Amino acid sequence: MSYTNDYIAQAKRILDCLDVVVIERIVGLIAKLRQEGGRLFFLGVGGSAANASHAVNDFRKIALVEAYAPTDNVAELTARTNDEGWESVFVQWLRGSRLSNKDMIFVLSVGGGDLERNISPNLVRAIQYAKQASAKICGIVGRDGGYTAKTADACVIVPTIDAATVTPHAEAFQAVIWHLIVTHPLLLAAPMKWESVPGQVAR
């Protein structure tokens, strides 16, 4: 089989392996957060940072959840990195945002963070800070889920089908899963443009 066929076959297997119970648990937690006036903070680095920005847009616009991502403010992010260090950059941003027990951090990551191997230590420190603040923690991560999966209230793990395609599948399925969550009937609050335009439905 060609690489394209292999890649698509892997994606199908991942879909079949996703933990529906965990996804529904995240939906419930975010619905409760919205009802209680809490805020949703998306954290990610690299491609996951871009996904975090997209997710913020969707949750604000479609689900009417107050959402933010520290990586959307390049000036503040680089200033904190320069002055305080990369490892603490999300912690200091969350501290400045007065993270509380009404709020949630939502980690998007390929590996979920690992202090021992110095992989995404900023995510680990942010999770530790969120625990101290009694904020909820959710995530969509790949591999074995790392520190995020060990400590989160609910974490979807994108299963590894092929070690050579961990990153593209993890980052792609972050989008698949958060789009599922934000359009879930328990969260959907505002009509989306194309869903309201009559058109042909593929069958």
Image: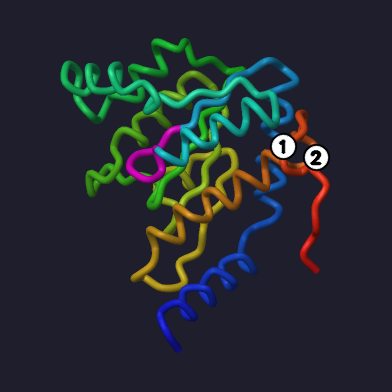
- Indicate yes or no whether the magenta region holds residue 45: yes
Q: Give the image location of residue 202, x and y in percent.
A: 77, 65
Residue numbers of the magenta segment: 43-49
**In which quadrant of the rendered view does residue 194 lie?**
top right
Which residue type carries mark 1?
Answer: Lys
Give the answer, above or below, for where 196 lies relative to 156. Answer: above
Q: Give the image location of residue 13, x and y in percent.
A: 58, 73
Which residue type carries mark 2?
Answer: Ser
Q: Give the image location of residue 78, x and y in percent.
A: 23, 22
Q: Identify the residue at image location x=75%, y=34%.
A: 187
Q: Identify the residue at image location x=67%, y=39%.
A: 182
Q: Identify the residue at image location x=37%, y=45%.
A: 47
In the picture of the structure, the residue carrying the numbered disc 1 is: 193
State which quarter of the image contains the C terminus. bottom right
Q: Residues within 10 Å of mark 2 (few under 14, many from 20)?
A: few
In the picture of the structure, the residue carrying the numbered disc 2 is: 196
Relative side of 74 to 137, left or right: left
View extreme (bottom): residue: 1
Depth order, front residue of 114/83: 83
Depth order, front residue of 55/40: 55
